[in-house]
Image (spheres, helix red, strand yellow):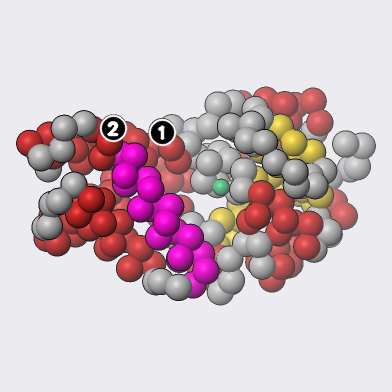
Amino acid sequence: MSKSYRHIFFDLDRTLWNFEENSKLVLQAIFQKFDLDKQIENESDFIQKYYYYNDFLWERYRNNSITKEQLRDERFKLTLEHFHITNTKMAFEMGDFYVSESPKQTALMPFAREILDYLDGKYKMHIITNGFEEVQHIKLNESNIRHYFEHLIFSEKVGVKKPHPLIFKRALKYSGARVTESLMIGDDYQADIYGAQRIKMDSVYYNFHKTPHTNAVDTEISCLSELMRIL
Ligand SMILES: [Mg+2]
């Protein structure tokens, strides 16, 4: 990359903040707290099923088929029902616990802090996220990375989610950046990379799991430390 970038837009979840690790920690805590070992043999089965229903419901939320509240209420209810546990009250309590505890977790992706330190001062950095605004603030503060970023752009505030071009256009406007001097870095091909491509913003696809794909990408990395070679 020889272009002279001035602004870097980061996705947050699974790009900087280690969603999988943090989520697992809270689900393990839930398994203990609600004595699920009495009814579910294996903790990892519970976690696997939660992920399954959460992904399913997130897809529906992304397509605007369900609301944020429905997403939060249903994911534990469906998970428990899979194990033949019908307990709406407990599902609600789990949902509350998950929502209040998970953003307080502080695991970052490998080399996230190192790369932010490396880029700090060289570029203006911003966040563009589809995650819930109040939750994302807690994550940024608790994991002590808020200070690296000048502008935080939330889909909830803009009214559309990535990959909608409007959220990228707003991000440029708020940060006073030109598209030609901007770079988007994210882990989600559809939301982050295709989204950036739609407004002709350069992008780096962070493919942490090295998932095979045939999508056209400008630059692809599987470790954030690789950014030191290109920026
Ligand atoms: Mg992400």
The quadrant the C terminus occupies is top right
The amino acid sitting under disc 1 is Glu
Circle 2: element type = helix
Q: Choose top left, top right, bottom left or bottom right for residue 4.
A: top right
Task: Residue at 41% x, 71% y: name it.
Answer: 66
Q: Which residue is more in the foreground, 34 or 227?
A: 34
The quadrant the N terminus occupies is top right
User: Of all residues shown, which one is farthest toward the right?
Assistant: 2
User: Of all residues shown, which one is farthest toward the left?
Assistant: 38
Q: Which residue is more in the foreground, 115 or 192?
A: 192
Q: Which portion, as a residue range, is magenta?
A: 47-64
Residue 127, image x and y in percent? 61, 52
- Looking at the picture, does residue 54 appear above or below residue 102? below
Q: Choose top left, top right, bottom left or bottom right for residue 161.
A: bottom right
Task: Residue at 79% x, 25% y: name it.
Answer: 229
Is there any visible trace of residue 10 in the rendered image?
no
Q: Which residue is labeled 1 in the image?
A: 21
Q: Which mark is residue 193?
A: none
In the image, taking residue 145 as reference, residue 192 lies left or right, namely: right
In the image, taking residue 20 as reference, residue 41 lies left or right, namely: left
Circle 1: element type = helix
Q: Is residue 56 magenta?
A: yes
Secondary structure mostly seen in the magenta stretch:
helix
